Amino acid sequence: MRLLTGMYHELKGNLKRELCHLRVRPLCSIAFLTYRCTNCCKTCNIWQQGSDGSDELDRDGWLRVVGNMSRLGVRTMEIFGGDALLRKDAIFDVIRSCREHGMETYFPTNANLCDQETVTRLMDSCLDMLYVSVDDIGEAHDQVRGVQGNFAKVENALESFFRLRGDRETPRLGIVCTLSRLNFRSFPRLVEFMEQYPVSVVYPRYLAEFSPKGIAASSVEGLLPEPFYLSTDGGSHLIRSDELAEFKEMVAAMKRRRHKVYVDWTTYYSSTDATYLKGEYPQASCRVATTLMTVCPNGDVSPCPMYRNYVLGNLARENPEAIWGNDKHRRFVQAQQSGQLPVCLNCNIKTYHNSSIPGKLKYYGIRAAEKSGFYKWS
Ligand SMILES: C[S@@+](CC[C@H](N)C(=O)[O-])C[C@H]1O[C@@H](n2cnc3c(N)ncnc32)[C@H](O)[C@@H]1O
Ligand code: SF4
Ligand code: SF4
């Protein structure tokens, strides 16, 4: 029954996204309040890209962005970074303003700056969902995230969050775990650890790692992509072929086991061996470039988080109607849809915003067959 209800709601949302995709209309957004970060993760290079922050919009600039998004019909905002809690001067008012404009807000955090007062303010601002990024337990987590003491901050944030939320159902809290060869063996332990908290969901999400070759071959109008999922310690973190069987057995065992927390394996069903070994995400179609508005720290809008220099306009300063769907945007969409951007092969973000109806029906078909015990996806 839960599967059927989930399918109904997802298909309804997907239909709306498909219509926006065809018309090149924005439905959701990802707002980089800053590229500055308090972690130095091995799997992500955003922390190496941040400037001193002097070009970032101030609070009022971000409130204009929210108002303009609402005029365009944007329904959700993912507050993103870097560490967006470096912008405590703006983040709470941005979330509140989204609520006032009827937009849902999601906020992934590394928890470094998520102390008790911050959690209280996030709740008072009516945040809809907090995602806490956790890659392992204790010191092993700190190793992946490049900063000692980060795991202790995660624990503090979780304790504060659930104590302060009490019996209320919102905000919801999800755990995001980026699986790679650095941590996949620890994932069962991590889920066990999370069972002590009433977390809404744990998302295991496989690593993205962009290939330099794909980047170099993907210029659009002379601009190269600048993806942020690159290794920062010189080595690849994709699992190796001699580890693949062990990885798959871990996933199969976790899917068989009953947990006190819900583990969402959705992205697993759109992954192949090439995903695990080469970082290739096979789905060709991208709904991000057509329906997800990327806003940079200075208010510039781009059609893709990986092409922050392909600027369509500025949402804090310009007429919003002249930005999304303009000629420059349509040229980008045309390049993406005609397969001219090899960089897209390594992009995991497109899979989170996949609204292809046949793809979803296939996913629910597989899940139903698995539940009946007649079929096993591997
Ligand atoms: C880029 S961070 C931004 C928000 C915040 N700094 C955080 O870490 O939660 C968003 C998510 O990307 C995840 N991530 C980091 N490296 C990744 C990679 N190479 N592939 C996929 N996801 C990755 C992080 O663990 C986090 O959950
Ligand atoms: S994953 Fe998040 S915390 Fe880590 S470097 Fe990237 S932006 Fe910072
Ligand atoms: S598939 Fe390509 S255009 Fe779409 S979000 Fe990913 S990198 Fe950007």
Image (cartoon, rainbow, N blue to C red):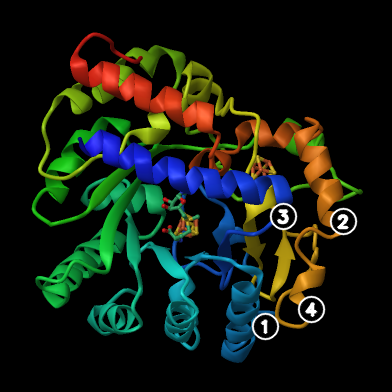
Q: Earlier in the sequence, mark 2 or mark 4?
A: 4
Neighbor class of circle 4 (other Cα within 10 Å; few <14, some 14-19, many 20+) is few
Residue type at tag 2? Lys
- Quarter-wise, where is residue 350 in the image? top right
Measuring 25% from the left and 82% from the top, which residue is drawn there? 120
Name the residue nearer the viewer: 318 or 73.
73
Q: Is mark 3 within 8 Å of ligand 3?
A: yes
Q: Earlier in the sequence, mark 1 or mark 3?
A: 1
Query: In the figure, is residue 96 to the left or right of 335?
Result: left
Residue type at tag 3? Pro
Which quadrant: the N terminus?
top left
Which corner quadrant of the figure contains ligand 3? top right
Residue type at tag 1? Ser
Element type where label 2 sits in the image: helix
Element type where label 4 sits in the image: loop
Find residue 319 and name its label: 4
Q: Nearer the viewer, mark 3 or mark 4?
A: 4
Which quadrant: the C terminus?
top left
Residue 313 location (% of width, % of height) = 80, 69
Q: Earlier in the sequence, mark 1 or mark 4?
A: 1
Q: Is residue 298 above or below residue 130?
A: below
Residue type at tag 4? Asn
| Residue corresponding to mark 2 | 328
Q: Nearer the viewer, mark 1 or mark 3?
A: 3
Q: Measure how far apart labels 1 and 3 are at the Cα level.
A: 23 Å
Q: Is residue 137 above or below residue 363?
A: below
Q: Earlier in the sequence, mark 3 or mark 4?
A: 3
Q: Measure how far apart labels 2 and 4 are at the Cα level.
A: 15 Å
